[in-house]
Each structure stands twice: as structure tokens, then as C-alpha cells.
Image (tube, rainbow, N blue to C red):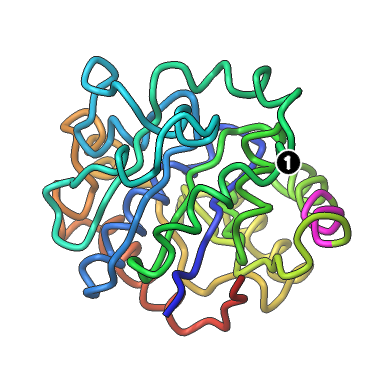
Amino acid sequence: MTARILAITNQKGGVGKTTTTINLATALAAFKKKTLLVDLDPQGNASTGLSFHPQERRIGTYEVVLGDIDIAQAVVTTGIPDLWLLPASPDLSGAEIELVNQNEREYRLKVALETVMSYYDYILIDCPPALGLLTLNALTTAGNVLIPLQCEYYALEGLSQLIKTIMRIRQSLNSKLEILGIVLTMFDKRSGLSSQVAEDVRQTLSDKVLQTVIPRNVRVSEAPSHGKPALLYDINCLGSQAYIKLAAEILKRKWSTI
């Protein structure tokens, strides 16, 4: 079986993108699915959130995307059964500039991952909060996109731009790219605004919006400072339970395969 590849992206920062990537990957691993998390964000927060601090990263996505090393040399074990990490190496922030003059620059990650596709069940890509060449590589590689959407006033405005970008990529670079779902994050049940945004998104995009909602949760926010996914930091908190439900719901969705 070939791995199902999921790009987790939103060009707006602070929407819970990396938190969702880490905890969804951990939940999939808990379901006995061999999962690779690819940290494609130069900030490297997904790597830090799995206890791989910048000083410990010598090789990773930068070297892989530039074609300097084979991906198998850069993948590391996380200590979590069935979960592996391709960390963000320190030089990744320069990749956008260096890729500009490269041949097939939009397909560098896709080519790199082809050699390990048969080993994993799921590959999750944590994208940068921008629609640059790194995100373009992720969307060209993936069959599916998960969009974390914060329940706030400007959410729908940025979402429409992202959906247009995905449609353009489908037309020109990756005809199989599909939106697997939109997940509402940082939901505050005490806030009328959160409820209104959630209602508006569901009315506009109906079945694209996943039923599972990720609540705003202190324990989830604390977990990265301990270098742990929330599921390991506090499995019983509301946020962790929501991510387990999200993984179960995602596993039942219809996936596009590359």
C-alpha cells in the first residue's frame, strides 16, 4: 500500500496548524498507523514539539528538498511507537530562495518521498504559514489537504484565498489534490463569535467541514513547552480527546491517492 499524504496548511499563522499536525500524527500512530511527520516549516515548531530542538538538528527537510541527501538518512525516530519525523533543519528558511533556480522546483519533495512511500501508512506535512515554494511543494506532493481554521472574525476571508490556490494547483500541477476537510480550532464555547464563525463556515462549505471541533485548551497550549504532543502530556484533557476523535473521523473520510 502506498502512503496517503496529507498537507496541513493555512497561510494565516496562529490557527493551530502545527499543534494539529503533531497531535493528529500522534493519534494516527496510536491507531497503529505507521506515520511520518514532515516538518516543512522553517520555524521548526513541529520538530520542537516532538523534543527535537534546533541544536540537535543537523540534517532534515532542507537537505532532502535540495537533493543533497536521501530522505532515509534524515528521518528520525520519535520515541512514540509508529511515529517518525523528518525534522526541519536550520537552513530551511533559505530553501525558498535556493529553489527558485532549480529544475522541477515544485516537485522536489514529491521526488524525495517516493523512495519511502511504501513504508508508511500516512505522511503528514506541516506547511509554513505562507503560500511560497515550500507550501507549493507540499501541495504538489499531497493527495489531500487539511485546513485548520481558527474560529475568529477573519477566518473565512483567508480561507477563500487558500481554496483558490488549491484549485489553481489542481489545474496546473496536481490534478489529484483534494480538500480532505476543514477542522475548526481554538473553539471557545463561551464565545458567541466562535459559534457564529463555526455556523458560517458550515453553511458555506457544508460537508467539507469536519464534525470534530478542537476546543481552546490550556493543556494543549502547555504541551509544546514540555516537548510532547498533548496526547502524551495529558491524554484526558478535552483537547487530546478532540484530536483522538479527529483522527478517527479522518480515517473514515474518502482519501485521494497519488
Quarter of the picture holding the N terminus? bottom left
Q: Left or right: 112 with respect to 244? A: right
What residue is disc 1 on? 104
- Count the marks: 1
Residue drawn at x 36%, y 37% as measured from the top left: 46
Q: Quadrant of residue 158?
A: top right
Residue drawn at x 39%, y 70% as measured from the top left: 118
Residue 239 versus residue 232: which sits nearer the camera?
Answer: 232
Quarter of the picture holding the C terminus? bottom right
Residue 34 versus residue 147: which sits nearer the camera?
Answer: 34
Residue 212: x and y, percent? 46, 70
Q: Quadrant of residue 122?
A: bottom left
Q: Left or right: 127 with respect to 251? A: right
Residue 30 versus residue 63: which sits nearer the camera?
Answer: 63
Main secondary structure found in the magenta portion: helix
* Residue 234 falls inside the magenta stretch: no
Query: Which region shows up in magenta?
Result: 165-170
Residue 144: x and y, percent? 60, 65
Residue drawn at x 57%, y 50% as measured from the top left: 111
Location of residue 245 with respect to 63 vertically, above or below = below
* Residue 166 falls inside the magenta stretch: yes
Q: Amino acid at mark 1?
A: Glu
Location of residue 254 with respect to 4 vertically, above or below = below
Q: Secondary structure at mark 1?
A: loop
Residue 5: x and y, percent? 51, 63
Residue drawn at x 58%, y 52% as measured from the top left: 110
Location of residue 82 with respect to 11 vertically, above or below = below
Q: Quadrant of residue 33?
A: bottom left
Q: Give the crowd class for mark 1: few <14, some 14-19, many >=20 residues within 10 Å.
A: few
